[in-house]
Amino acid sequence: TPSPTSTPPRDPLLPPTTTTSNPNNNSLGPNVYMIDPESWTTNDIQSLFDSLYKKQVNNEMGSERYAIYFAPGTYGSPTAPLLLQVGYYTEVAGLGANPTDVVVYGKIEVYNRCFVKEDFFQEGEFIPTDGSGHCIALNNFWRSLANLEIHIITPPQQDFCRGQANFWAVSQASSMRRVSIVGGKLSLMDFCTNPAYASGGFMADTLVQGQIENGSQQQWISRNIEVQNGWSGAVWNQVFVGSIGGLSDASFPDPPVSTVADTPIAREKPFLVMVRQGQANNSNGKMKMAVFVPSAVANTRGVSWKSSGQTTSTPGKLLPLEDFLIATPSTLAQEYRLALGQGKHLLFTPGVYNIYDTIRVERAHTVVLGLGHATLIARNGVVPLQTLDAEGIILAGITIDAGPDAVSPVLLQIGDRSQLPSSPATSNPNHPITLSDVYIRVGGPYVGKTNIALEINAHHVLIDHTWIWRADHGIENFDKSDGYGGDNERWRSNVGVNGAIVNGNNVVAMGLFVEHFQQHNLIWNGDNGKVYMFQSELAYEPPSQMDWTQQPSGILGYEAYKVGDAVQNHYLLGGGVYCYNRNNPDIVTERGFAVPKGRSGIVLEHIMTRNLSGPGIIRSIVNGIGPQVDSNNRGPYYLDRYASIDYPTRFSNGISAPFQTGKEEIETPAVFAANQAESSGASIQKGNPRGIIWTIALASMISIVLALR
């Protein structure tokens, strides 16, 4: 390992990590653009966005990172509207105290990305084009929009179809926060090009005066949003927490909607603001940058910045930028240690960072904030980022990648594993450790290796949107003749055993996306955990059933969602597990979810399984309960409610609930042998066609699409 007092040499396999100039002349680096209404014309703004979008529209595995910030003011006009498109690794945000401080006339959009099929079933790849190919949003990851107001005005260059909405056609790792949308419709799919699949997504603290069109979005979580003209449509798993104007779940699964009236605990993501020096009301003071850190609040409904129709202030505190270490990819390990030891916070400017020494956050209430999807790469098997179990620590806006040169034990570790379970928690339920828009990746741009992506050993942790992804596609140069599109080499090379392991108690997750790991995607060992919206695709590429069988139990496959045997209380609302075994179509997974039985405090509501694209089998939804999904019965199949106490550990020769499949469902032998059987009583339904209209209409294309996911 290189000395921490010097910058490690750059690995030629990895992207460049240094810059030599700062043409934008600001303290946050050359990839941060500060736009103000005095010195930027409408044409200037349009040219900047056009230029960056051209670079980033297909740059899914690239190393460039950008942040574009608008100072308080008005941009564009009703007669000269802006058309701003957001590509990969691009953050767009206002710098006002409230979203209404920055007004954009026009649109801020994400469209489908179009591909041309190239010998797909042999090569497993698509080649991007500029036009009329296979157009989807399934890969529209890593971008964000926040803290501004859009007055939807159709620019003159848009055709009739594009004029119907402001399109935000995104999938995982693409958040919309603190946005006000005035006039028109917000569409979460791009219906102007086909087949238009989308697999998002997350929206929080956002007010939409018009309608939201869900369209083809397979799953979505909305937290503390307000929709004044209704939400249209749902596909497989749409969850509303503390929101006003969404859909009702009274007739679940038609539509497949889950709702919670009030958000049990929330903390909005920290954000940059532009304030005046001295007193806030000093209109003559010099403008300067700061970070606003919202407070944690309990039992909320609707947006944080309006009350009774009037703009109000989100509760929280301002931290001057001087209180932060402004990190760049060339920042040294000793600089991180010194700054954190002096009580400073960390701000990562846009870029890709090789991390050779663990960045360890020990002080309560420390803020670690990434701009422009700043990305940390684990080098030489290091744990890139670690925190103690200290109250109020906030991690936000960062992506952590597994590195190629050694296996990291963990990529993000919250709390010290050795302190559990005997030592008292130092975290505080009123000041939870918070993860907001924190993304973790294994593989994709380069080979990645880790045992655990995210490990939580602290109590009172709040996860407010995360995507933990072991890549099912990338540019690692695998031998495409070795399995499906190189899947055998992918399985051997991209080591990712478990996605997330939660050992702490009283952990709450809202928007937990975990996919493709080589064993369980999620293991939850802590007590009193709560999860609102879980989305999980099982690994696509196990080469053989032996590679996908639990030992020593012999259970076929690894459940995506596993609650540990010692857990007494756990709650999940809105969970989906999907299979697509493209590398070996004979792979079997016994169950999508597994929980201990006979526990009155364990309840799963509105959970489902789905066969995505033909190959692959999930034999039951949870603990042997529920129908099989396979190439002939793809689902989705829903379980309205599974209460563990209702299913004691005793044998039952099948279950009596109607599945609308015309046959009795019986527990699989391996599940029975390992865990014994459940009794009857589950309420399971097949997804109503009206609730999945987009899926059915586009079903003939889905097998091609999913190789991209």
Image (spheres, rainbow, N blue to C red):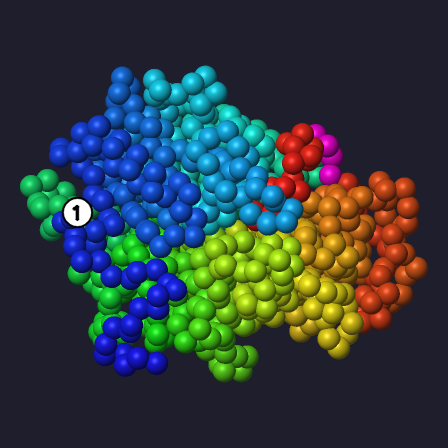
Is 575 part of what is drawn in magenta? no
Residue located at (52% from left, 51% from top)? 511
Q: Is residue 601 above or below residue 416?
A: above
Is residue 246 depicted above or below 607 in this figure? above
Residue 250 in the image, given as x and y percentages of width and height: 67, 37
- Coordinates of residue 306 in the picture (x, y in percent): 36, 37
Mark 1 closeness class: few <14, some 14–19, many ≥20 residues within 10 Å: few
* Left/right of residue 254 with respect to residue 147 in the rendered view: right
**Which residue is at 7% across, 41% downward?**
284
Magenta residues, start to end? 687-692
Assign the magenta stretch its main secondary structure.
helix
Q: As drawn, is 81 to the left or to the right of 239?
A: left
Quarter of the figure with the N terminus: bottom left
Residue 305 in view, yes or no: no
Q: How many marks?
A: 1
**Lateral position of residue 64 relative to residue 525, left or right:** left
Task: Tell me if residue 416 comes above or below residue 162 in the rendering.
Answer: below
Q: Which residue: 84% across, 52% down? A: 681
View extreme (right): residue: 653
Instruction: Depth check: give the residue in front, 565 or 89.
Output: 89
Question: Mark 1 falls on what kind of element?
Answer: loop
Which quadrant holds residue 446?
bottom left
The foreground one among 690 and 411 is 411
Q: Amino acid at mark 1?
A: Asn
For disc 1, the marked residue is 24
Q: Residue at x 42, y 38 (%)?
A: 206
- The answer to whether residue 334 is left or right of residue 624 is left
**What is the x, y in percent for residue 388?**
40, 74
